[in-house]
């Protein structure tokens, strides 16, 4: 937020515009601010469009999967595993879309203007954005591992995959624990 300080009798000659940190706003600073907002507007639009496209694609895949399951029902174990695996992949797709949506909102909120967001989605600084994204990463990793476990045939090394996933989730959890 920009404030105005008056330092004399004539506001035209003695008005100094200062930024949130108390530093004077010069023409160069204001130009950099405008250019920065434009650059981040591109990032907001790009990640927002990508999020919407992923949500639409996920919805279309969901409809196609439901249509396939209804028109060609099967009680075989492999067919049921395939339906569960596709469902988990769809959930993962929606989680990735959510990540891009939150990044878009976060960039807008941090670098362009405040947005009327619900309290759980308020982003005041980069740490807030990081926290929200890391929470989604933990969920996405768990969903990915669940998908691997459901489709595991015994050929691949699921233990190594599980340990890597667990180590990443533990590291993120320790980060949250140390931070709070």
Image (cartoon, helix red, strand yellow):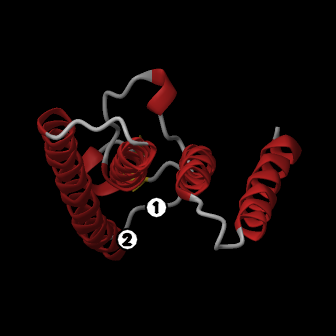
Q: Which numbered dot is residue 29?
A: 2
* Alpha carbon distance from label 1 to label 2: 9 Å
**Quarter-of-image position of residue 156:** bottom right
**Quarter-of-image position of residue 26:** bottom left
Q: Which numbered dot is residue 24?
A: 1
SS for dot 1: loop
Residue 85 makes an appearance in the image: yes
Residue 151 percent coordinates (x, y): 52, 56
Q: Are marks 1 and 2 in contact (CB under 8 Å)?
A: yes
Q: Give the side of residue 167 with respect to residue 71, left or right.
A: right
Question: Front-most of 17 and 47?
Answer: 47
SS for dot 2: helix
Say which of marks 1 and 2 sits in front.
Answer: 2
Who's the residue at 50% across and 26% down the image? 120
Q: Give the side of residue 164 with respect to residue 58, left or right.
A: right
Question: Front-most of 134 and 76?
Answer: 76
């Amino acid at each position: 937020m920009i404030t105005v300080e008056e330092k004399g009798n004539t506001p035209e000659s003695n008005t100094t515009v200062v930024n949130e940190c108390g530093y004077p706003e010069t023409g160069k600073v204001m130009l950099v601010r405008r250019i920065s907002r434009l650059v981040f507007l591109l990032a907001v639009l790009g990640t927002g469009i990508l999020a919407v496209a992923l949500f639409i694609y996920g919805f279309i895949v969901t409809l196609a999967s439901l249509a396939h399951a209804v028109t060609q029902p099967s009680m075989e174990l492999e067919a049921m595993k395939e339906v569960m695996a596709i469902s988990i992949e769809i959930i993962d797709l929606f989680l990735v879309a959510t990540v891009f949506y939150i990044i878009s909102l976060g960039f807008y909120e941090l670098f362009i203007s405040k947005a009327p967001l619900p309290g759980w989605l308020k982003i005041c600084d980069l740490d807030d954005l990081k926290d929200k994204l890391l929470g989604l990463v933990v969920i996405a990793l768990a969903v990915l591992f669940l998908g691997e476990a459901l489709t595991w045939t015994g050929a691949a090394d699921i233990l190594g995959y599980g340990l890597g996933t667990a180590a990443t989730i533990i590291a993120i959890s320790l980060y949250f624990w140390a931070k709070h």
